[in-house]
Amino acid sequence: MRQNPHRFLLIVFTLVLVGLGSHYVIPVGMFIVRCISGEEVYQFTIQVIRLVEKYGFRVVRNATDNKKTNQYMVEKMGGTGEMEYCVPNPCPLEGEDRPLF
C-alpha cells in the first residue's frame, strides 16, 4: 500500500500578543491547518486586532515571516498592493489615526 508523503504536512498558524515595554507573551490563537490562503490569514489577523483592541490592548506592530500568505496580508493591509514598512491600522478606534509598523 502506497502512503501519501504529504499527509503529515501541517501548518500551525499562531497569533500572539507580545509586550513592547514588558516581557509577556499571550497566545491569542493557534490553528492547525493543512493549508491557509493569504486572504484567510488577512481575515484572521483583522479579527484578532479588533478583538484584542476591544479589550484594551493597542496593536502597534504586526510582525510576520516572509511566507507568501503573510506577504499578501501585509500588502492587503497597506491598500497599495506593495510591501510597506508602515500600514494604516485596519481597525482604528473612533478618532484614532494610528499606523501599524
Image (cartoon, rainbow, N blue to C red):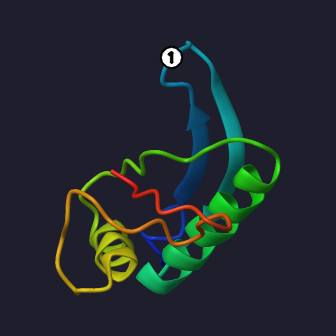
Q: Amino acid at mark 1?
A: Gly
- Residue 53 coordinates in the image, percent (x, y): 71, 52
In the rendered image, which residue does mark 1 sit on?
Answer: 21
| Dot 1 alpha-carbon crowd within 10 angstroms: few under 14, some 14 to 19, many 20 or more | few
Q: Residue at x 60, y 41 (%)?
A: 16
In this view of the protein, can residue 4 be seen by the observer?
yes
Front in this rendered view, residue 55 or 26: 55
In the depicted view, which residue is nearer to us: 8 or 70? 70
Quadrant (top left, top right, bottom left, bottom right) of the N terminus:
bottom right
In percent of width and height, residue 83 lies at 18, 70
- Asked if 86 appears above or below 4 in the picture, the reply is above
Q: Quadrant of residue 48?
A: bottom right
96 and 65: which one is in front? 96
Q: Residue at x 59, y 49 (%)?
A: 15
Residue 89, percent across and down? Answer: 47, 65
What residue is drawn where x is 27% and y is 72%?
Answer: 68
Q: Is residue 74 above or below residue 79?
A: above
Residue under the image location 27 percent in, 59 percent down: 86
- Number of marks: 1
Left or right relative to 55: residue 92: left
